[in-house]
Amino acid sequence: MTVSATDAGTLRLAGREVPRLGFGAMRLPGPGVWGPPPDRDRAIAVCRRAVELGVRVIDTAWYYGTPDQDVANEVLAEALRPYPDDLVFVTKLGGRRTDDAGWAPALRPEQLREGAERDLRVLGVESVPVAHLRWIDDGGPDVVPFADALGTMLELRDAGKIGAIGLSNVDLDQVRTAERITDVASVSNLYSPLQRDDDPLVDHCAAAGIPYLPFFPLAVGSVADPGAVADVAAELGVAPAQVALAWLLHRSATMLPIPGTGDPGHLEENVGAGSLRLPDDAVARLDAAGRPSGA
Ligand SMILES: NC(=O)c1ccc[n+]([C@@H]2O[C@H](COP(=O)([O-])OP(=O)(O)OC[C@H]3O[C@@H](n4cnc5c(N)ncnc54)[C@H](OP(=O)(O)O)[C@@H]3O)[C@@H](O)[C@H]2O)c1
């Protein structure tokens, strides 16, 4: 049976109707999200297969690579140009890599502008449909007040470099602040059946009709570890990743998971989760298993 990302249903993201199952490009570079893919042909094949399977939302960042090499964006461009008209890249501005393969903020106006220009140049597009303001505060000189960073994003949108503004790694107060200033196209935070701290923001986004793109939706693979997700998967005869994604899709109508993989088999499995309907008792067990202790 051929699977399709549209099996997961659709939602409106930045004015476009898109399948609710996306693809995260962070696993395209080498180990540690650093340097070129170990097998470039395979990485290209995964991107092409994602689009063949109907995926239309691709989460990426210019800084998925090294400080000098925008690996994920390079692979995406090589694999997918000319892009389908309905493909929606969701990028991130506000972070960068350090020379020792770490992650650091890059929230000053010139840094946000430089990241936007790198996205346009390497992806080979005139405008990126959605850019997330990736909040990261290490207390250092590259952090500015949240509203100021948002101001630079508004300038980038006014200049047509980005089509819509989303937010990433933010809390509910920041989302509310942003909502008073502009339309929030989407929110992308850490969330999975195993990591539910963001439940209040998931609910807020559902109520406000804001697409929520959980990152680490598979808890970076640990949904396969012994526990409720793996138990349900074994009972249903499906993969733990599929149970995790099906639970996320069931959790909220504005949920749009972006699982990351460099493996064509895993990609197929992840897209296949869109047609998996979990029995009520399985949903109840997963709901209970993932709650923060005391909740
Ligand atoms: N906004 C942010 O700050 C932020 C932060 C982190 C990530 N992200 C985005 O979110 C996306 C998703 O996060 P992620 O990729 O880090 O974590 P994830 O989707 O939770 O898990 C990816 C890991 O799980 C493995 N995997 C994927 N599908 C699988 C399957 N069907 N069965 C078994 N293992 C599977 C992958 O390995 P294989 O390659 O071997 O499949 C990879 O190691 C990223 O790609 C990135 O685009 C955003």
Image: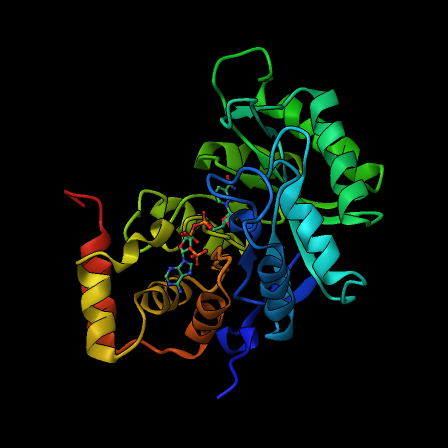
In this view, the residue in front, 244 or 81, is: 81
Q: Is residue 294 left or right of residue 192?
A: left
Q: In this view, does 181 lie to the left or right of 176?
A: right
Number of numbered markers: 0
Residue 201 lies, in percent from the top left, at 42, 45
Residue 241 lies, in percent from the top left, at 35, 64
Q: In which quarter of the image is residue 135?
A: top right
In this view, the residue in front, 49 or 104, is: 49
Residue 108 lies, in percent from the top left, at 67, 19
Tell me, yes or no, if residue 262 can be seen here. yes
Residue 85 lies, in percent from the top left, at 79, 66
Tell me, yes or no, if residue 91 can be seen here. no
In this view, the residue in front, 201 or 240, is: 240
Q: How is the image coloured?
A: rainbow
Q: Is residue 281 above or below residue 170?
A: below
Q: In which quarter of the image is residue 152?
A: top right
Q: Quadrant of residue 82?
A: bottom right
What residue sits 48% from the left and 13% below the top?
139
What residue sits 52% from the left and 52% below the top?
208
Q: Is residue 50 above or below residue 258?
A: below
In this view, the residue in front, 161 or 48, is: 48
Q: Is residue 223 left or right of residue 37?
A: left
Q: Is residue 277 left or right of residue 155?
A: left
Q: In this view, does 241 lie above or below 97?
A: below
Q: Which residue lies furthest to the left in this view?
A: 294
What residue sits 68% from the left and 54% below the top?
76
